[in-house]
Image: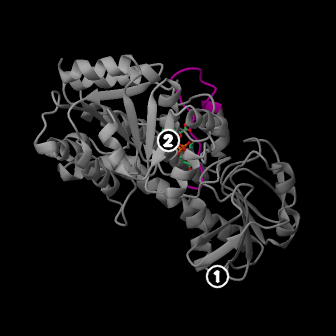
Amino acid sequence: MALKEQLLRKIFARQARVAVVGLGYVGLPLAVTFGEAGFEVVGIDIDADKVRHINEGRSYIEDVEDAKVGRLAQDGRLSASADYAVLTACDVVSICVPTPLGKTRAPDISFIVRAAETIAQYLHPGMLVALESTTFPGTTTEIILPRCTRAAGGLTVGQDFFLCFSPERVDPGRKDWTTKNTPKVMGGVTPACQEVAAALYGAAIDCVVQVSSPEAAEMTKLLENTFRAVNIGLANEVLLICDKLGLNAWEVIEAAATKPFGFMKFLPGPGLGGHCIPVDPQYLSWKMRTLGYTARFIELASDVNRSMPWYWVRKVQDALNEVGKPIRGSTILVIGVAYKRDVSDLREAPALDIISLLHDKGAHITYHDLHVPAFEHVGLALESAPDLGMALEAADCVLIAADHSGYDWEWIHSASRLMVDTRATLKPGALSLARSEGGADRRSGVVF
Ligand code: SAJ
């Protein structure tokens, strides 16, 4: 029987052994999803701590309950190892490794290359390889495919082994959309690859969206996050425009959002944080530059989004100037340093840029974040203020960078001498008054 039929038979019988390389916020939920679909799953990670957690039946990812990992580990349907040799007994391997930006903001696919080269050492006839890491169009066929065809003395894709790209769509912290119920896009290198990959994902995930090639699937994911980055860039430019016009951008955007069709709300903020939205579009624009094309919307949105920390530092400067204080020597309390509401992740957090800019201007920085107890940045080792009331009392100016839902924003605004609110934490357009030293009240929201 041909290898494809053999693998399909194993998949339909849930006898295919699935390996997941990279057990982070994408890989662990994927491993658990395959495990709960009845497959035997082995996770592979270089982090011995992650391996130990899984083999002890414990989770280390907020979205994955201990009980799920425990049950699967106990049933022998989930285990972990740091040794890729486990692949010799596997039929499927899914690659879920990070794809960050390097120092020059060019794609860093070193994790993918390393995974592909190690997998190739154990690739055997009848295996399916699925790349899930977000990357530029062409990675699957230009980076993974040649390393696999050179394996085991020479294999032919679509006959001896199968290869596809299927982007992850995990949104950390989200409860409504999970790995299992979020539609899964996938594109195979050959029709046989398509058939095998669709069967595998279809066995574990509710909806599989087949596209015509790995490149189409790679581009689909980049479009999703480029769409967000560009629209967030537009929202930030609307803020800059409204500032010039003396309007409240949040009021205007919320009013526009009452249009029941043809509009999708994005809001201004301190800048663009996280490990997806600031990064993924750069993978696309970098790839296009290698083809002699400038992806202008991506570049422009990136310029606007990356300029926002400077804009907000100028707002702090203006606010202090109003009461005759320089930034130098002033105490500035930053509330919410994480990259967005209700997360503890600091990756690419715009608050970090704002803090380093203020620090460079001689400000004394304090911060409070319900989800971030301490962090180090540009030589500063900071801890979240133990008493927010006292920190507010001591601050010459307060800047809100992440609007965590656990804060009493009315109280914070009323207790702040000066307020720079990058998130308009009070109802946009509401006449909420932030007291300033001069006694004069100012409309909060965008202004200080
Ligand atoms: N942001 C704004 N204004 C907005 C929306 C976001 O300034 O209107 C900022 C956020 O504060 C944050 C950054 O942009 O700093 C990114 O925010 P995000 O809401 O896009 O959140 P992420 O980075 O967690 O994006 C993830 C992505 N998920 C995947 O890649 C699988 C993204 O595709 C999701 O749409 C997003 O979560 C989501 O909707 O929560």
Q: Between 191 and 414, which is closer to the camera in this rendering? A: 191
Mark 1: secondary structure = loop
Position of the C terminus by quadrant: bottom right
Between label 2 and label 1, give the one nearer the viewer. 2
Q: What separation in Å lies between label 2 and label 1 (alpha carbons)?
A: 51 Å
Q: Residue at x 59, y 20 (%)?
A: 260
Q: Which residues are magenta?
A: 255-272
Residue 39 percent across, percent down from the top left: 45, 27
Residue flagged by tag 1: what amino acid is it? Gly
Up-down: is 370 above or below 405?
below
Residue assigned mark 2: 79
Residue assigned mark 1: 362
Q: Is residue 57 left or right of residue 187?
A: right
Residue flagged by tag 2: what amino acid is it? Ser
Residue 370 percent across, percent down from the top left: 75, 55
- Residue 227, picture quadrant: top left
Sequence-earlier tag: 2 or 1:
2
